[in-house]
Image (cartoon, rainbow, N blue to C red):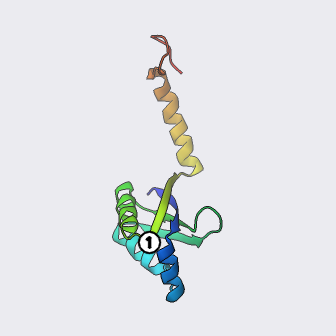
Amino acid sequence: MPLFITQGRFTTQAVRGMMATPENREEALRELIEASGGTLRGYYFTFGEYDFLTISEGSVEGMASGLLVGAATGAVTDLRTSLAMSAREMQDAFSAASKVTERFKPAGAPRGSTL
């Protein structure tokens, strides 16, 4: 199953709410991801540009649905999700790309030229 890394920020309203009523959001996040057909692998708070980072596993459609639900709450913003691949998966992708490159003509390249 695909592995996803998501970063995001809490809104000011969410931070105020969590300060007024401190809670561990990991279980709620786990339930959301599981309801979307995935598995939460890690949930971390971060300093810097983003407030949190999650690592989850699931289908593309499931991940998209979970992200939409999270964004719709208004409690998080600036969600950024990346697909993570193992070294073996990337090796397979490079192998597939080497076979496809012979048939791909770059934009603006003369007819008959390839990568």
Image x and y of residue 53, in percent: 56, 66
Give above or below for 81 relative to 38. above
Q: How many marks?
A: 1
Which sits in the foreground, 115 or 10? 10
- How many neighbours does mark 1 have within 10 angstroms: few (below 14), some (14-19), or many (20 or more)? some
Q: Residue at x 52, y 64 (%)?
A: 8
Question: Can you name the residue that lies furthest to the right here?
Answer: 47
Query: Is residue 22 at least partly visible in the picture?
Result: no
Image coords of residue 87 (percent x, y):
59, 48
Q: Is residue 92 shown above or below 39?
A: above
Q: Quadrant of the C terminus?
A: top right
Give the camera-side residue of 72 and 103: 72
Residue 33, quarter of picture: bottom left
From the viewer's side, name the closer residue of 102 and 76.
76
Residue at image location 54% in from the left, 37% down from the top: 94
* 11 with respect to 71 (left or right): right
Residue under label 1, please give it.
75
Q: Is residue 4 above or below residue 87?
A: below
Near-viewer residue (17 or 23): 17
Question: Residue at the spot x=65%, y=64% of the render?
Answer: 48
- Which residue of the protein is positioned furthest toward the top in this rendering? 111
Looking at the rendered structure, the kind of residue marked 1 is Ala
In the rendered image, is residue 29 in sight? yes
**Residue 43 coordinates in the image, percent (x, y):** 54, 72
Quadrant location of the N terminus in the rendered image: bottom left
* Secondary structure type for disc 1: loop
Residue 67 at x, y = what percent?
Answer: 40, 63
